[in-house]
Image (spheres, grey):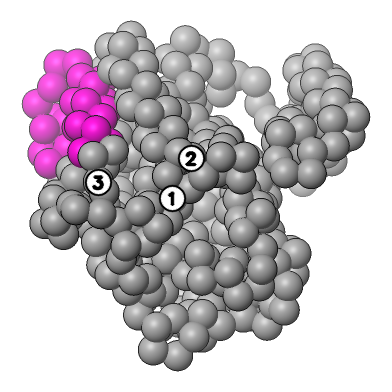
Amino acid sequence: MFGVCAVVMLVALDSTIVGTILPQVARELDGMALYAWVGTGYLLSSAIVIPIFGRLGDLFGRKPFILASIVVVAVGSLMCALSQTMPHLIVARTLQGLGGGMLVATAFAAPADLFPDAARRIRWQALVSTCYAVASGLGPLLGGAVTQAIGWRAAFLVVPAVAVVSFVMLFRYFPRLVPRHERRPRIDWLGGVLLVVAVGAPMAALELGFAVGAKPLLAALFALVGAAAIAALWPYEKRVELPMFPLRVLASRESRLLNVVSVMIGAVMFNLMYYGPLLLQTVVGMTPAQAGLVLAPLVACIPLGSVINGRLFPRQSQPQRLLVLGAAIVGAGCLGVMGLDSGSSTGFAFAVFGLSGVGLGFVLPNLTLFMQIIADRRDVGVASALVQTTRTLGSAVGTAVIGIIITRTSVPAGVHSGIVMSLLFCAVTVVLAPQIKMKNLRR
């Protein structure tokens, strides 16, 4: 579990350290028009590989994939440090996203392998969530501090240093748990390709169709390809003995609702994490280091919410109520963020971002835990990966939409539009969550 926590911290640093440094990087590389693509490329590449490696982990064990992903993340971070243009940075971050997706697919499913009993597992998931949140809180702070002291290129070297430690720990201590099969599983290559296209093509169409320098015809082509892949994937996976994406993980109404909520919460979370620093620097007038410090409560308070959620969960006859409470708290925090301007106090900014973090601490662990409970034991990896994928897709869509608004209007208008969208998603989650009927884990 320490090995799992180490790699979860690596994922968190990899995804959040860029938040406070990206405005300065975009200005230096003269690429503000491509600002959103840095985040979208990372999230999109993560999204397309999470379900694939979640499934491969179910079939072949997770250790080889988790070790390979650490190497990919470290190499991508080094490429980011050496980037000379914004397109180079986008390519490097996209490579990091591939590694990050592999890490997410394996790390968040590992507790289910080690602790089949869900009632016991929730305590360990609190540890994983705490490590993720602490590292996420350190990411923006480290990024801003290193950028101000040495330069933004040095900030990208933090991840490779952590990757070395993580690799050694996991290579030495992470157990090689290989599922037993009557015969060697055959990889569903065609299903994997269809899944990649079904996830990736619509996202590419969104950026190509609405970003600055839009290419409507190419966007329409990507949209059609994505629709065709989705249409082909569904009947094809029904016929395959070991499908890359087992459709049974979405058979229940509860699992479908969970993934709808996951999409919306992903958009809310990443809008706060990704555009929060931009709001603090361009609207409130903070430095990168100050923005990183103010943003830290957003992720540092996630473990607080997670611990409270873990205490309340066994006592609830209807645990889905905790999703309602979490979404309401996040919505209250977003309402406070909307009120930030040049005259806002640092204490108020701390409070509203911290409140949002507490709410996310209620929502995030339950999404994963509920999916693992609903899924068959043989599908726990791909089920965990699915909820991470939909959350990542929500993050990618939210980031892309707000990035488009920023490039077409202004930074304040785009960021405030993102907060309004986040408030709407929180409200919809409050309505949908009571319909997710879950059994209590108390014996």
The residue at the point 25 percent across, 54 percent down is 342
Which circle, 1 or 2, is nearer the viewer?
2
Task: Please indicate whether residue 150 sits to the left or right of residue 39 in the image.
Answer: left
Q: How many marks?
A: 3
Q: Which mark is residue 340?
A: 3
**Of the numbered discs in the image, which one, if any, rests on residue 297?**
none
Measured in 3D between alpha carbons, the distance from the residue under mark 3 to the one under mark 2, in whole angstroms, is: 14 Å
Viewer-side residue, 233 vs 74? 74
Element type at mark 1: helix
Residue 364 or 397: which is nearer the viewer? Answer: 397
Residue type, mark 1 in image: Tyr
Does the magenta segment cover residue 325?
Answer: yes
Q: Give me the C-alpha separation between circle 1 and circle 3.
A: 13 Å
- Residue 133: image quadrant is bottom left
Relative to 367, is 287 above or below? below
State how far apart marks 1 and 2 are (Cα): 9 Å
Quarter that holds the C terminus = top left
Q: Residues within 10 Å of mark 1 (few under 14, many from 20)?
A: many
Q: Which picture quadrant has residue 52? A: top right
Q: Residue at x 65, y 46 (%)?
A: 44
Q: Is 364 rendered above or below residue 432?
A: below
Using the rendered image of the protein, determine whether residue 42 is visible from the camera's viewpoint. no
State which tag comes first along the sequence, 3 or 2. Answer: 3
Q: Which residues are magenta?
A: 308-336
Q: Residue at x 70, y 40 (%)?
A: 211
Identify the amino acid type marked 2: Gly
Q: Are marks 1 and 2 in contact (CB under 8 Å)?
A: yes
The quarter of the rendered structure image containing the N terminus is bottom left
- Residue at which label 2 appears: 414
Q: Position of residue 294 (x, y in %)?
A: 24, 61
